[in-house]
Amino acid sequence: MNNLFRLLVFKTSLSLVLTCLSTPILALEYQQEFSSSHISQLTSVSQLSDVQSTDWSFQALQSLIEKYGCIAGYQNGTYRGNLKMTRYEFAVSLNTCLTKLQELISTTNNSLLTKEDLDVIQKLQTEFASELTTLSSRLSNLENTTSEIEANQFSPTTKLEAEAIMAVASIIGENTSDVEPNSSLNGNIIFSQRVRLNFLTSFTGKDELNVRLESGNIPEFDDSVTGTIMTRLGFDEDTGNDIGLDEVYYSFPIGDSIKTTIAISEMELNDFAEPINPLASSGRGAVSRFGRYNPILRNMSGTGLGINYQLNQKTQLAVAYMANDAAIPTEKNGLFNGNFAALGHLYYRPVDNLGITFTYLHSYYAGVGKSGIDLTGSTGSLIAQSPFGNVATTANSFGLETSWQINQKFVLSGWVGYTKAESPVTNDNADIVNYAVSLAFPDLGSKGNLAGLILGMPPKVTSSSLIADRDTSLHIEGFYRFQVTDNISITPGLFVITNPEHNANNESIVVGTVRTTFRF
């Protein structure tokens, strides 16, 4: 009966080993974090500072260490029993046990191994000869694959991430501009692309230097095309296919709770105050610019400093300072004398499936420089973008965003934004409001797919000492992302702008697109 029991135990254990080794090879970053020098052989369970005699696993560890010498610990005297085991740690532990077993078999006078045990082992070797051969082969293949990855990796410190978007798009409606009022947008179909290469470098394993190269010819469907900036796509980028340096930033931790980011070039406020809307991605989320996240987070981009502080498991605070003409040395420009924004952003998660963010933003535009004045991030009416014209403008913006994952396949999200703008030059003032509600359906139809619906009001000047928007535009959007493979997705989508420029005299404009995204 004992032999039969041992056979069953051995067969179960061997099956577990084969299952573990048949899973995909460990990601390279784990390989870089772990090496056999991190662990050392133990002779007594008392060497482990984090294992107590009252622990439920104490007896098992004591037997494996002191009787068989088969368990290793970390060099700092800990076992870390609650941590997940990497495949490399598993291989080291398994090799130690197998080596000890061979020693016991070769020592005929060893009291720990009886003749009965040897007979059982011989029977097991005979019965599982094919499985043992398979195990040896898989171990060899694992070693060969790991060696190949080491030899052909892009860099031991730098990881390359790339995204390429190819898009077909068209506009149907009438131009709302004063230059060509009510002229037809003839629905010409365009085909264009955007490519991003991100080089992510870590020097300590915890920090990250990100350098992004970008190129594209996806046009901005703005007021020069349709008479309004409400029609912009969420992934547009027109560099004339010239390759340029886009985002550059360096982030590093301070202790366990603080992450500091130095933004060198072209970072946006949403990189510090990350939106919780599941449709926020430019390459995989909403197809419109407005539908991705609250426009007040588009208020400023450029150079600055951000700090993210993890207050506790449910609460995180982000603060940031951003200047978008920091590299210009002339008057009313630079890091502190030109356009700037100061951000405070609080993220709170009362329960696992519900997130809420509160945002405050103080911004200032000098009315000079290459950036101009853009309080809405090119998403609302032209009046809301610069309510007082090209004169110095200050703004205090407040935002509330929430995302509720009702179940695994349904997420309800929304936001509201309010901006109080003033001009210290003319003493004018204006109130700007925007809001949106979105529905997300992850894995609809198949794993990796995503359907989204968005209904909202692009930024609107509700009151002003000069000119206010007189009517209300609605943004209505729907899309469906079909995940073809792990690296390729195709997203047909469209959005409708009713009463463009918050003017009921303007006919609705429809923007349709098919976005194909490649990621690797």
Image: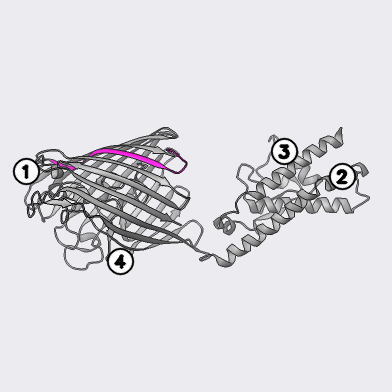
**Local crowd at mark 1 within 10 Å, few (<14), some, or many (≥20)?**
few
Question: Which segment is the magenta one?
Answer: 444-461
- The image shows residue 160 at horizontal and vertical percentages of 46, 61
> What residue type is disc 2 on?
Lys
Q: Earlier in the sequence, mark 2 or mark 3?
A: 3
Q: Quadrant of the N terminus?
A: top right
Mark 2, residue position? 123
Nearest to the eye among marks 2 and 3: give it: 2
Depth check, front residue: 495 or 95: 495
Residue 279, picture quadrant: top left
Q: Earlier in the sequence, mark 2 or mark 1?
A: 2
Mark 3, residue position? 58
Residue 465 - label:
1
> What residue type is disc 4 on?
Asn
Residue 288 - label:
none
The prevailing secondary structure element of the residues shown in magenta is strand
Cβ atoms under marks 1 and 4 closer than 8 Å: no
Depth check, front residue: 430 or 457: 457
Mark 4, residue position? 241
Between the residue at mark 4 and the residue at mark 3, the CA separation in whole angstroms equals: 63 Å
